[in-house]
Image (tube, rainbow, N blue to C red):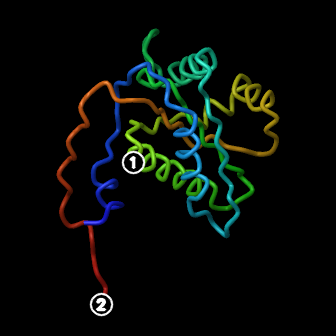
Amino acid sequence: MSEVMNVIKERRSIRKFKPDMVPKDAINEIIEAGLYAASGMGMQAPIVVAVTNKETRDKISEMNRKIGGWQEGFDPFYGAPVILIVLANKEAATYVYDGSLALGNMMLAAHNLGVGSIWIHRAKEEFESEEGKAILYDLGIEGDFEGIGHLALGYADCENPDAQPRKENRVYYID
């Protein structure tokens, strides 16, 4: 089996992270994998906001918690010290798919580097809010961007979960 297939089959979502920061070079390599994801008509609609500042990370976590309706004190990023936020320019017809592919590539790259990850939703709602728009404004991000998802990154503080058995009857051939 190829190394790529091994990474695809072994990667799992991690829901408990150590507080140790992921090195910047590893974060950059993971982001690069996302930037090389396929995109409709080559428009490269996704952008990535890398959040390593704890105060900002905690602020975004709290926004996400409120949107998700969880109890106070719950961290929807499971303690991950790094959050990669994928947004995509809505001018591209395929922006949601393009952002999703970027997230998928980044999850595989993270696993390949020994970094745990989990895709967390609600970025759309976060960055439609005034608080979210202010974060983008402060970064100088202009345009019609939609939050596609967050990739929580860090070193796993748990065993890699086992894969669920694959369901049958999911492939059909027309020969």
Task: Tell me the quarter of the picture where residue 71 sits.
Answer: top left
Q: Residue at x 42, y 37 (%)?
A: 117
Spatial distance from mark 1 to mark 2, Cα to Cα? 35 Å
| Count of numbered labels shown in the rendering | 2
Q: Residue 112 carries which label?
A: 1
Task: Tell me the quarter of the picture where residue 175 sits.
Answer: bottom left
Q: Nearer the viewer, residue 3 or 87?
A: 3
| Crowd band around label 1 with a 10 angstrom C-alpha radius: few (<14), some (14–19), many (20+) | some
The x and y percentages for residue 19 are 43, 19
Identify residue type, mark 2: Asp
Relative to 147, is 139 above or below?
Answer: above
Q: Which of 34 and 144 is in front in this view?
A: 34
Can you name the residue that lies furthest to the top here? Answer: 72
Relative to 141, is 133 above or below?
Answer: above
The x and y percentages for residue 150 are 53, 36
Q: Which residue is drawn at 54% across and 31% down?
A: 83
| Crowd band around label 2 with a 10 angstrom C-alpha radius: few (<14), some (14–19), many (20+) | few
Q: Nearer the viewer, residue 83 or 63?
A: 83
Circles 1 and 2: CB atoms closer than 8 Å: no
Query: The residue tagged with tag 2: helix, strand or loop?
Result: loop
- Residue topped by disc 2: 175
